[in-house]
Image: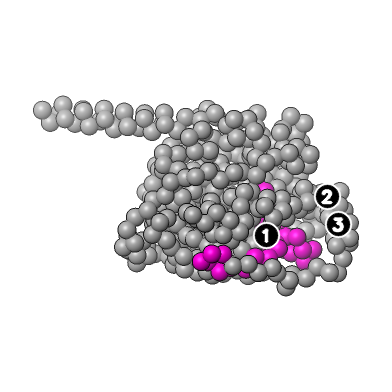
Amino acid sequence: MKTNRHRSTLQLAAFSALVLLSSTASAIAGETVIRTPQGDIAAIDAPKSQQLTAKTAHAHPFATERQRAAAKPMVWTDRGNDAAPQAAALTDKLVRTAGSAPGGSAPVFGNYLARSHFRANWDKLDALDARQGAAQDASISSEKDGAHYPYTRFLGNYYTSQWKASPWNKIGKLYFTKPNGSSSYCTANVASGNSVLVTAAHCVYSFGQGWNSNFVFVPAERYGVAPYGQFGWSTARVPTNWISSGTRRWDVAVIKLTGEQTSGLPVTSYVGWLGRAWNQPYSLYTYSHGYASNLSTQYTNICAGQTYDSPTEGTNVLVQGCDMTYGASGGAWLINYTPNSSSGNHVNSVVSGPHIGAFGTAWVGARFNDDNIVPLCTAIGC
């Protein structure tokens, strides 16, 4: 009897694993599930047909400025939430150990290297900067208050003084093809010395449809120009909980980049990388970045304000006042914000979508913690 029961248990486990793999079917063959001590992670590797190199650029859907300009911002869908008793969120705050990983700077000659490798692109931006003139002032900001979440919004890598510097040059546009064949983009962030991007899961796996594909990352993109080149991908990871439930707390993903299309150098050789933080308090002063199409697709904007937890959103979801919308998905929420420095600037969340009942006045992001960013980094090697 015990043997039969044991055999039944094994059969049930095998069936459950099969169901999991079947439920994560995608447009790209070769999906696997990586087991980590903190949770299961779905993984996909880039087919050779999606590699971006100098030889394959002619056939790639995002190889040129014109192709990238045709991509539409990723539209937010009305996803469910993991609303739970407030006590659960409070318990999570108490028992988790806060952690962080530092950012890193590019070599001191990183900008010189980029200018020599992508001279035509830098010439375009130099000409643009000259037209904008000395009127640029990073201290100028427009202030706007959300319904219940006060914040200040100001320009990001629009400024000549900022687009070449940290942390702004480590944030860029992520282009991809959706399962239905349409072109789209999100915001993404270099957040590991191993050339790993952190972004939103819905930018990597369209819930209920499958994996997105043909990923190309353009750091510090500004007016369609790629001052630090463009980078393909080798592998991507999302939590299996995102694939099965699509709720905000799991809306985090990581992508390993390949070398730059023409030079072959890693992205960190040009821009360095941001730090990461997890299990931090729910309420922190945070700077959230994004290429929001309702403001401009040509440069980033930043919302600065206190983050909150909300009973309507549930555990491990952060809320912040902000009026940015589509295209900002995946943008970094930075704590320890330190302009013009590779110290501080820890990614603590990424843009997921609108706060319930507050579209255009407040948004949410998955709170980085032991259940999402930690197993993702374990699975991809941050």
Q: Identify which residue is drawn at 74% across, 52% down.
A: 298
**Does 178 appear in magenta?**
no
For the residue labelled by badge 1, is the local secondary structure a helix, a strand or a loop?
Answer: strand
Residue 304: image x %, image y %? 60, 67
Q: Identify which residue is drawn at 42% across, 31% down.
A: 23
Compared across the picture, whether 158 is left or right of 183 comes to right
- Between disc 3 and disc 2, the foreground one is 3
Q: Quadrant of residue 84?
A: bottom left
Magenta segment range?
146-174
Which of pointers 1 and 2 lies earlier in the amino acid sequence? 2
Relative vertical location of residue 217 with respect to residue 284 in this rendering, above or below: above
Question: Distance from label 3 to label 1 (Cα)?
Answer: 18 Å
Relative vertical location of residue 286 with respect to residue 379 in this rendering, above or below: below
Residue identifier under label 2:
121
Which of pointers 3 and 1 lies earlier in the amino acid sequence? 3
Q: Residue furthest bottom?
A: 139
Residue 169: image x %, image y %? 70, 58
Residue identifier under label 3:
128
Compared across the picture, whether 286 is left or right of 228 comes to left
Q: Identify which residue is drawn at 86% across, 57% down.
A: 128
Q: Residue furthest left?
A: 1
For the residue labelled by badge 2, is the local secondary structure a helix, a strand or a loop?
Answer: helix
As shown in the figure, which amino acid type bears the numbered disc 1?
Answer: Asn
